[in-house]
Image (cartoon, rainbow, N blue to C red):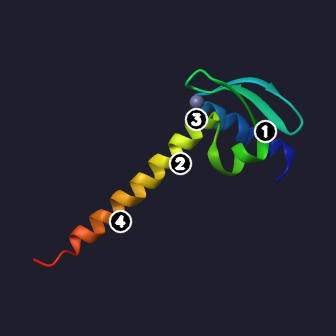
Amino acid sequence: MDTANKETILTESIIRDGATLVSINKQTINFTCKCGKNHTKQKSAICKTSGAFCKDCTDRNTQIKRIKAKIVLNANLLAQQAT
Ligand SMILES: [Zn+2]
């Protein structure tokens, strides 16, 4: 991934995730999460996976994803229920 592209993805992630950019460093960026917490994160982590969220929000997002997957799984199981 070239640098210019990476910066674009970073900026888009910050806008999309409702965060406010504080400063960009070489490997990390410092931002205010939409919950109001200040957080520093690896640039690559924001681009590749978790978005511009603080640790608490990332943990919550992960749990929500897990619950959503479970709901789908349960719905599938219920659909297969013998009548
Ligand atoms: Zn947060």
**Residue 38 spot, x, y in % from top left:** 68, 23
| Residue depicted at x 85% and y 50% | 2
Q: Mark 1 sits on what residue?
A: 7
**Residue 40 spot, x, y in % from top left:** 75, 31
Between residues 11 and 45, which one lies in front from this camera angle?
45
Q: Mark 3 sits on what residue?
A: 56
Verify CB contact (< 8 Å) between mark 2 and mark 4. no
Q: Earlier in the sequence, mark 3 or mark 4?
A: 3
Choose mark 1 or mark 4, whichever is in front: 4
Q: Residues within 10 Å of mark 2 (few under 14, many from 20)?
A: few
Residue 73 is labelled as 4
Residue 71 is labelled as none
Secondary structure of residue under mark 3: helix
**Residue 67 spot, x, y in % from top left:** 41, 52
Q: Classify residue 10 as left or right of residue 17.
A: right
| Residue depicted at x 64% and y 33% | 54
Under mark 4, the amino acid is: Leu
Secondary structure of residue under mark 1: helix
Under mark 2, the amino acid is: Thr
Verify CB contact (< 8 Å) between mark 1 and mark 4. no
Residue 62 is labelled as 2
Q: Earlier in the sequence, mark 3 or mark 2?
A: 3
Q: Earlier in the sequence, mark 1 or mark 3?
A: 1
